[in-house]
Structure formats: structure tokens, C-alpha cells
Image (cartoon, rainbow, N blue to C red):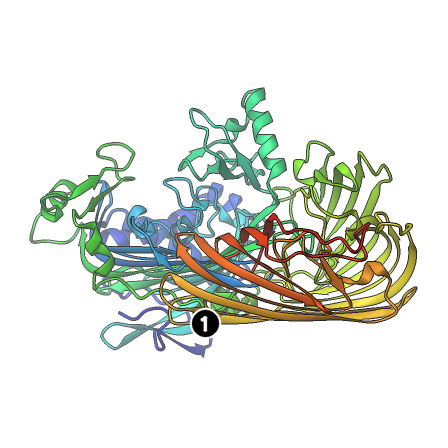
Amino acid sequence: MRRPDEPGAISVSRFPNLPLAPPVFRAGFFRRVGVCAGFLLASVLPGLAAAQPDDAYLDETARRLITGARAARDASLAEILSYKAVVQERVAVAATASSRSYPLMSGEHVSRLRWFQDQPNVVRVLGSRVRFAGLPIGGLFQGIAARYAANPLQDPFHFALSSVLPHSRATMATFLRSPLEAGSERDYQFRSGDTISLALPGNRSVQVVAVTATPRFRSVQLLSAVMWIEPESYGLARTVYRLSKKIDSEFEWSVTGEERWPPALRIDPGDGAEDEGSEEAIRVQSGRTFSASDRHRGRLDRFLDGIVNNLMPPTEMDVTSVVADYTLWELSHWLPRSVRVAGYLRSGDETDLDSPNSILPFIRDWTFTIEEVQSAETGGLPPATARSVVERWREDGDSIDFGTGPTDGPNRTITIIPRNRAALAINEGLPPPIQHPHPDFPQDDALLRGAARTVADSGAAGNPQEGARGRRSPWAFEPPLWTLRLLRYNRVEGLSVGTRLRRRLAKGTGVATLRAGTLRREPSVDLTLDYGYPGRRHRFSLYHALRQRTPLGERRRIAPLNFAADPADYYVATGVALQLLPSRDERLWGSLTLFAERQLQVGGFTGTPPTRQMRAGGLASWKPWWGRSQYGSWSGGGNAALEGWLGDNPAAKASLTGALLISLSARLLVAAEAGAARLWGDPSPHDLWRLGGGGEWLRGYPSGALSGEAVQKVRAEIQYSVPLLRLALFGDWAASGDQSLRSAGLGVSFMEGLIRVDVARGLAQWKDPVLAKEPDVWRKPGWALHLRTDTRF
């Protein structure tokens, strides 16, 4: 059986739309009766006809195919009793931040599955392995197809999306409105399209007709889909689809719920007044589904949930491509063959350029090898039962997980886990890992890329508006004090409080931010328009706000907590800026900023009064990164920045760094970095390169320990990997003119640099003639703690 991404699985030869011929496949008696009854009911019941809007079907072929597919599926309820299959599953998740990307988690699973229509399903695990940050760890990879026991009578939309936020019964499929369910005409419009040739085993092929399902409005409950239906048996052979709207404002965090306290991420579709159950929310961590009434909890519960939601950064998720293929078993039954899902989860503030904006792209797929099918018309041996299958598949020492649900109910999976779990990781039946060398690996997958193009070319995505059932307010207000993530502290502002107003636009977002502090009473105002989704972005800003200079010359945001920052690093900027940025689906590999502003130095050097400067200029940055940080491989890249301005103290400054990481073993890695920076023109003392403090160029020293118009640095370290963490021993060297400083220390890197903590000690005395009150006094080195995010090492 071919995998869906193998050449020749489907020959995409196009034909004119074929007439719908009567069924000729060997469908059983129940199927034939069911299909005929379905057509009869659809044509004679006036109530059913009245429920369908007049514009639901844009041609008669689409009406007959969709009606036939529903009837054929329902007829299978009386025919297919059970089937047995071997299921191979894979998953890969990457972590993408602004400087680079790396594999976060991957796993493979193989199991034997026995599905029953009216009994618990039985699964025996044959092989399983899982890796975090490229390192194998103990435990089983949780197979989705095994846990959800691929129901051939369930449409592929619900089954495929069981892999998104997969915990027990709480999945996206809980609230999805499938194009194949009864009454979907009020949510979708259907149009028939071209015909393609589908290859079947035994050198046979069938003609399948494309039907496009276009959502009437944007909602996380609706899909943009293309279905290929066989016009004789009305079997669904393939479908390609994506969500019609990314999930963003529907996300909410919860720390309470019934008897449990674990924090959990919920999805609330929030537009379900018309349908029972459409307001169901998902509680992911606990693995249980709660209705909207769960939100009507006590005051303490609502208060705690509000604190968590206002601490966490905005979160969004999208399912960008899904491909589900079915195969025709012995020319009688359409059964699942393969499913492949791609998407991403993003956390971060889309309007804050330098806040941690982590992207987690993922791919999940599974394939079925059908071994046996039992139907109502199958003769010979008596049908198998769940009890007999467990007794036959279980071996001495195996453990059994009976799952949840009624003892003898069909919506339950009994899992048999072998005694020797260590042998599961080397089972020959395990599929090869998903390779994802590129940061945006889902978009590099040929099958998924083709699926996304198919949906776009078909017009299924359309241009749906947010209708009455899908509408959410485009305005969002983040009140002061209550929005805890907008609180921050530094030695210039003291404790400052922020508030923000957002306005969603068709291709962007408008944001107004106001902030006031306890030490600096003058408020900061920032008006930003981000435009250009889903492609390259253009950001226009008007501002009167506090800014902070950094060693690399970048215009970064101010850290939420900074107790030791030098006030000389801060200034108030009043002006306008235009930024050219990559798409939000890409990491921040490069940007261009044009600005015109007045700068007021709020914290001067010793003996230097506050200064005002008028400047206009630009800043360009480039952050390339190549390779993979896995055993036997290398990765490398760097950072180049160029800034120049006219006006008061016209000058230009540039910095260039290069880094290389080499994996010596599965756990041992060496890294080295070198860089230089230069300043030209007529700079003010505030424009000098100042190293130390933040730890980007020099660790172990305070801010400004080393300064000048030209600086150089070299740093090296050895890293040892444990799951999710890297332990590092490092050394730094930096110089400016005739002065050089050295330091050494220990570091802990979480998720390969997404969060990094270093403890460093300076190894040389230092003096700074600009900052020191007594320039001839040498200062003794000491210990320094550095907390950084999104670091290479």
C-alpha cells in the first residue's frame, strides 16, 4: 500500500466532470438499501429540504455527491462490524524563536488495532520511542490512531483533528462542524469540480470527483475543504482541508475546574446559542471536556483564572494543512489509509517586536495497513469479540490500560503494553522519524505544501466574513493593573503600569499603548499599526516612550524586570518609525527600520547633564542561521546590524558576529563565537559601544565596564545535554583599545537557548574613565547573574 506522499498514489490527470453512474461495486445488501434510503429521504422529506438554504449547492452534481456520501457512510453502520490493522504513527514538533529554530520533540509509534462497532477497541503496542531536544527519553509515545481507534464510520474531519490538542475526549473534534454532517448546508456552500484518477491495488483505478466546501463565515468550528468522492459507491476517497480561522481569541487559560487544579488551556468557540454543545470548551491537561456552564464558577475560581490569563502572553494556533486518504477494501468498503496534519502554536505579543515570540510548528501523521474486515455479510468463522482479542493478544507480564468509559461501551480503548518496554524503542516496525531540517518544516513538506495549494486554488478558502454566529468584537481592551503582563520595573520608571487597546483589521492589527511609572510620572504613549498579514509586514509607529540602548545597537523593548540596569542606557524617544518585517509565520531573521525622532537622555553619565538630540536614520539587521544541532552535524550563523543617522551628532555604527556549534556526541557540543563592532562620525558619549550588564557580548561585568568606538569579542563554551536542558562551561574575552576583560562561568540553557541563565565571574580588574568618579581607581571583579532569552548559546 502506497504512502500518500509517494509518487503514483494518485495520478492527477484531469477529465471533464463525469456523469454520476449507478453503483457497480460489490456493495453489500445493507449498504445498497441504506444508500437508496438516504436518497429517498433527502428527496421526499420537506422538513429536510427546508433546512437547506437555496444557495447551499451551486450545482446538482455537488448535491448528489454530498447526499450520497452521507447515505453511504450511514449505511456502513449496518454492515462493518470490525476490522484489524497495523497502525504506524509519527509526530515532530520544532521550536522557532527570533534567532533560530531547533527540533523540540519527535516520536514514532506502531501498534496492532482491532476496531469494533459496538464493543471496546483493543490495541497492542508493538513499538514506541520519543525524543526531546534530540535526546531519547523513557516512556511511551501516545499514539493518536490507537487511542481514538480509527472509526471508519466517522468522517475524516473529526478523526484527523483528534490529533490537535489530543487528550482523551477533549479534542478540537468536540466542537467541529463537519461538511458531511446533517444540516451543514447552513454553514457551507458546495461546488463540484474536476475529476482525477485514483490508483487502487491490483492495477485498478477509479474516477473520483472533487467537491469544494466553502465556509459561509470564518470560525474555528468551520473548515475550508476539498473532497474527492467516488461517484459509483459514493465513498470518500480523499479530503484536503484547513481551519477557516486560526484560534486566537478563543484561547483561555484555566487553573480551576471541578475537583482539579492543574493549569489548562481551553478553547471556547463562543458562538453556540443555536446548537446544543457548540459552546463546549476543551480542558487539555485534564483530558476532559467541560461545557460552557463550567465557566460559571465561584468568584475565587474566576479571579484565579483571570490572573493567569492576564499573566500569560497572547496565544494562537492554526491547522494549516490536513490530508486524509481512504482505500477501497476488496472493492466493498472505504477504510482509512493515511492522515497527515500540519500546523503551529504561537505564543507572544504580535505588536512587540522583541518580546519572546515562540512558534511551535508541528507535523503528525499515521498510516493504516488493513489486515482483516468483518462485516454483516461475512460468513465462516464467528465474529471476534473484544474479550477474545485481549486474551489472544496478551502475553505473560503485559500490562493493560482499560481507559475510561463504560465497561462494555464502544467509545473505549483497551491498550495492551508489553512487559519489556525497552524493546519497544528498537522494534523493526517503527516508521522512520519525520525529518525537519528547516525552521518552517511543515511548509517544506511536499504533500502538505500541495494540500495547501489545492485548498487555495479550489476557492474553498473563499473570502468568508465573520457572520452572526462567527462574529467576535474586533476591539480588545487590556485594563491597567489587571493586565499583569504589562507591569514592569526598572530604575528609571520604578514600577510602571500599562494599558492597551487593540483593533483587529482585515490584514493587520492596530494597537494603542499607554504606560505610567512611580518614579517617572510622565506617561509613555505608543500607537502602532501592523499591516500585511499573512505576508511581509509593514509596521508604522507614533510614540513618546522610554527606550533602552543595547550592546548590539538594536532598538529593543524594555525588559519586564531589571533591577541592575544603568540609567545611562535609557532615553525617551518622541518620533515616528516604519519597520519592514518578515511574515509572522517566519522567524525574525531580518528587519529594516526607518525612524525620525527626538531623544532625551534621562539618566546621564557622571557629570554629564541630560541632553536632547534630533535624529533621522535607519537600522537594518540580519540574523541568518543554518544547520542542525544534532549528533554528527553542525549549525552556525550570526548577526549583522547597521545603523546610521543624521541630525545632532551624526554617526554610523555596525556590528558583526559569527557563531559555530559542533556536536561531538549525542550529548556533548562545543561552540565558539567571535564578533566586532565599530562606530564612525561624531557620536555623543551615549552612542559608544558599552559592554557588560546584559551578557550579550561580555558576561561577569556590569553595564559599561568596557566601552569605546571599536570593540571586539571572542567567547567559547562546552555544553552537556540532558532532556530539555544544556549545562555549559564558558569563557568570554572582550577588548576596546588597550583594555581587555576576561570572564568564566557556568550556564543552564532551557530548550537549547529559549531561556538561558548564566553565573559568571570577571577575571580582570577594570576601569571606565567615562563612568567612574575616580578614573584612576581600578575596580575588582565579582560575580554577575545574567538572564537572557532566545540565545544561540
Residue at x 21%, y 53% (from the top left corner): 422
Residue 482 location in percent, x, y? 69, 31
Is residue 224 at all visible to an observer of this figure? no
Up-down relation of residue 485 to residue 347 (above or below): above
Q: Residue at x 30, y 71 (%)?
A: 2
Q: Amino acid at mark 1?
A: Trp
| 584 over 501 or under it: above or below | below
Residue nearest the observer in this picture, 40 or 695: 695
Q: Mark 1 — residue?
A: 634
Instruction: Find residue 204 and report its horizontal and vertical position in percent.
Output: 27, 75
Examine the rendered structure and indicate whether residue 109 appears above or below residue 591.
Answer: above
Quadrant position of residue 411: top left
Q: Position of residue 501 (x, y in %)?
A: 75, 42
Residue 659 quadrant: bottom right
In the picture, the quarter occupied by the N terminus is bottom left
Q: Residue at x 68, y 36 (%)?
A: 483
Image vertical order of residue 159 relative to residue 6, above or below = above
**SS for dot 1:** strand
Towards the viewer: 414 or 464:
414
